[in-house]
Amino acid sequence: DAATQSSLRSIKGLKGTEIAIDGVIYDIADFVHPGGEVIKFFGGNDVTVQYKMIHHHHAGKQLEKMKMVGKVVDYEAEYKFDTPFEREIKSEVFKIVRRGREFGTTGYFFRAFCYIAFFF
């Protein structure tokens, strides 16, 4: 029908207040993001990779809060998530770095603290 056809667009047809995630277009004009207005900088783009990198643990919950307004007709995933290779790499990393410490070890935080204290 006409309503469905009008909601099918290409990535280049996204407005400044719309983002695409996994080929689905969301309007973020009225969306209140927990991180603030920074989400508005991504308007008009496919943000699938960025979204999944940041929200991988609770992806579905966040998408339910956004207003879906259409689909991308020519969508092709530029990166495949949760592949056997990715799972293998993660398992090797977690042999070295404990879960919850992916973003910094105790030594890293100590050095960062010392550098900051030294310069300020």
Image: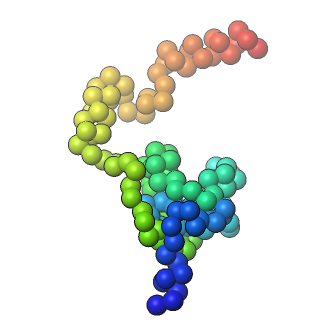
Q: Residue at x 49, y 75 (%)?
A: 8
Q: Residue at x 61, y 59 (%)?
A: 44
Vertical placement of 102 versus 17: above or below?
A: above
Furthest residue toward bottom:
1
Q: Please, is residue 70 above or below residue 41 in the view?
A: below
From the viewer's perspective, tell me whether residue 27 is left or right of residue 9: right
Q: Please tell me which residue is depicted at 48% across the width and 83% down the height of the picture.
A: 4
- Asked if one can make out residue 53 in the rendered structure from this viewpoint, the answer is yes
Q: Nearer the viewer, residue 49 or 57?
A: 49
Seen as rendered, the residue at the extreme top is: 118
Q: Quadrant of residue 99?
A: top left
- Locate residue 53, reporting x and y percent: 46, 45
Q: Nearer the viewer, residue 39 or 91?
A: 39
Horizontal placement of 30 versus 62: left or right? right
Residue 31 visible at all: no
Report the side of 11 relative to 39 (left or right).
left
Toward which corner of the image does residue 28 lie, by quadrant? bottom right
Front residue (pair 107, 13): 13
Location of residue 107 in the rendering, given as x and y in whole percent from the top left corner: 49, 15
Residue 118, horizontal then vertical, whole percent: 70, 9
Residue at image coords 25%, 39%? 85
| The residue positioned farthest toward the right in the image shown | 120
Q: Quadrant of the C terminus?
A: top right
Q: Position of residue 75 (x, y in %)?
A: 42, 63
